[in-house]
Amino acid sequence: MKIDELDQLLLMHLQQNSKITYKELSDKLNLSSTAIHERIKKLEKSGVINKYVALVNRRLINKELLVFSHIKLSQHSHDNINSFESEIKNLKEVQACFHVSGDYDYIVKMAFESMDEYRDFMVNKLTTIKGIGSTHSTFVIGDIKDETSYQLI
């Protein structure tokens, strides 16, 4: 799907505030509310917009400990990869998982209330997944920049 400059501006506004009204978008982009509605539906149907979410402050919900774990599989077989990816998707503590190149195979993002909760997760959940060769975790000391939007313009 080709995204023109108006779509980019529309996406920029929606990323900043997904609750913005069609009327407000209409005023900002000098388009009719009907045109705004049609463009948003087109972006949703094509998959450019795949969902709307509320971004929650993790500290205010008691998830102070942010952890990135680097995971290396013991073997790069089709079965190991599929098994790991299937199991990691089902762990509620996992916010994101990326298959990466380099020294490790995956980077997993997780948030916990405490070091004890993290340790329990590692011992009783993550390291019990078949095919994991090693893990290396990094703990976030401070948030410098944590954006969810993509800069399109």
Image (cartoon, rainbow, N blue to C red):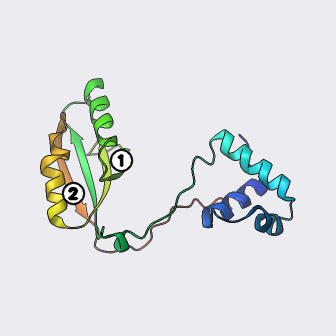
Q: Secondary structure at mark 2?
A: strand
Q: Residue at x 33, y 75 (%)?
A: 142
Task: Please name the amino acid that badge 2 sits on.
Answer: Ser
Q: Which residue is mark 2?
A: 137
Question: Relative to residue 67, is residue 57 depicted above or below?
Answer: below
Task: Please name the amino acid that badge 1 sits on.
Answer: Cys
x then y, percent, for residue 1: 71, 40
Question: Relative to residue 152, is residue 98 depicted above or below?
Answer: above
x then y, percent, for residue 56: 44, 66
In the visual, does 53 lie left or right of 81?
right
Which of disc 2 and disc 1 is earlier in sequence? Answer: 1
Splitting the image into 4 quarters, where does residue 44 fall?
top right
In the visual, does 146 lie left or right of 139?
right
Q: Residue at x 61, y 67 (%)?
A: 16
Question: Relative to residue 65, is residue 137 depicted above or below?
Answer: above
Q: Which residue is mark 1?
A: 97
Quadrant where the C terminus is found in the figure = bottom right
